[in-house]
Image (cartoon, helix red, strand yellow):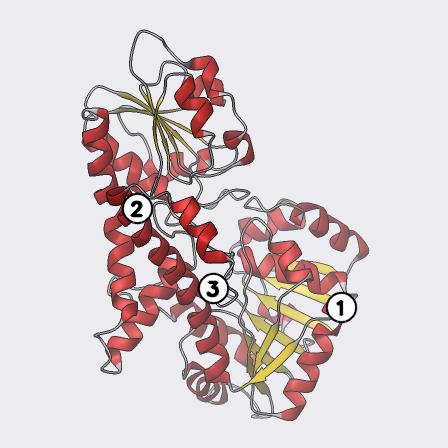
Amino acid sequence: MNICVIGTGFVGVVSAAVYASFGHTVVGLDIDPNRIEKLKQGSVPFFEPGLTELLLEQQKTGHLTFTTHYQEAVPSAEIIIVVVGTPSTAEGQVNLTYLYAACESLAPYLAEDSIVVIKSTVPPGTLPDVKKFLIERTKHHKFGLAALPEFLKEGTAVQDTLHPDRIIIGATEPEVFAKLEKLHQPLHAQIIKLSPASAQMAKYASNAYLATRITFINQIADLCEKNGADILEVIQGMSLDQRIGAQYWYPGLGYGGSCFPKDVKELAAYSRSVGLADNLLNDLDYLNEVRIPRLFNTYKKLVGGWTGKKVAVLGLSFKPNTDDIRDAPSIKVIQLLLNEGAEVIGYDPKATENIKLFLAQTEHLTYAASLDQAVKDADVIIALIEWPEIIKYDFTQHRRKDVPQWIIDTRNQLNRQILTAAGYRYIGVGR
């Protein structure tokens, strides 16, 4: 098949490379000439394990190319996959500006019997509006339309795409279902055929439910700190119940990243727009927003105040194995510490340059090139993200016997016994 993928962000590049690996002819399209030029050279503008190798391999075979021109990519495409950003407004509503801009640009070149696939996360009810929009701008009205929500996790995106839990296709026409089923046959995954509205709602509901699990276990962790229970033991006691399961219990500072905060806010805003404001979704967003300030107010009391303390912040991305800092806890944590008078030194294996650009030149904030440099002489060490090298690091070599030192383990991944035996004052979450 000839495929055009519009949007070369995280999902777009991964999808284009994987579809090309199936032997399809894929063109990645973006209006950013600098990004396209880098991709042509095999340079991925973000870190994702295994993606650079796949990208280079597929460009070498000729199955994958990139362009900035709609007239080059769209006319011959049987399937046009739109995967542009749909950010949230200040009120939490979805911003569809980039989606409609892409649709306006592709419409004049849309071939008969081609299929426009919306892979971007959009609210239920968007597809009928997109269809009307395209009909008003095309030379003909003979095209298909579908929703194809993505469920990729940054850090494992290539493997997630190659080995998905399920493929959800939202459409109304049998020929559209058939074509998209054929496209995804090499994945050998269960294909679920839904209405477009149900497909889009399934994406929002999936992310909101996972965010709910994180928020719920954080609430239980807070109670554990009041009564002497250990959240890790509590999770062990819960998870063998088959109705509950052992996956996705992550007590910590709350959820972050490019999807969960955005999707929860958008689903909450959507619920308010249809008269259902008094619901769990709006509470989820609030509880997540206030969690870091509340926890760090507690930590402030435990360490005797932040003023004048040297604080090592380890893990600047929002999760391991990515350089993505969107809604990363490090941003709130660093700004909070600086406002309280701390000297902050940050470290991350991949995301340091992105944080530098985001926070610009900030007084009392420096960055370390290594863990050794970051934690040396630190009064407080905060392990924010469970990068393997942070979890495995021997912090005891930097224990200063003459002064108190704290380690705040926000993901409960460090060895508490070893650290306390070395003389550190250990602070976990729900422990």
Could you tell whether 47 is left or right of 226 in the image? right
Task: Say what secondary structure mark 1 lies in.
Answer: loop
The mark found on residue 224 in the picture is: 2
Q: Is residue 273 left or right of residue 52?
A: left
Q: Which residue is mark 3?
A: 244
Nearest-to-viewer mark from 1 and 3: 3
The label nearer to you, 2 versus 1, is 2
Residue bearing mark 1: 24
For marks 2 and 3, the one nearer the N-term is: 2
x and y, in percent, of residue 186 in the image: 76, 69
User: Residue 231 placed where, x, y %?
Assistant: 38, 46
Residue type of the residue flagged with mark 1: His
Whether residue 368 can be seen here: no
Label 2 Cα crowd, 10 Å radius (few <14 / some 14-19 / many 20+): some
Front residue of 420 and 309 = 420
- SS at badge 2: helix
Closer to the camera in the image, 347 or 66: 347
Residue 117's image quarter?
bottom right
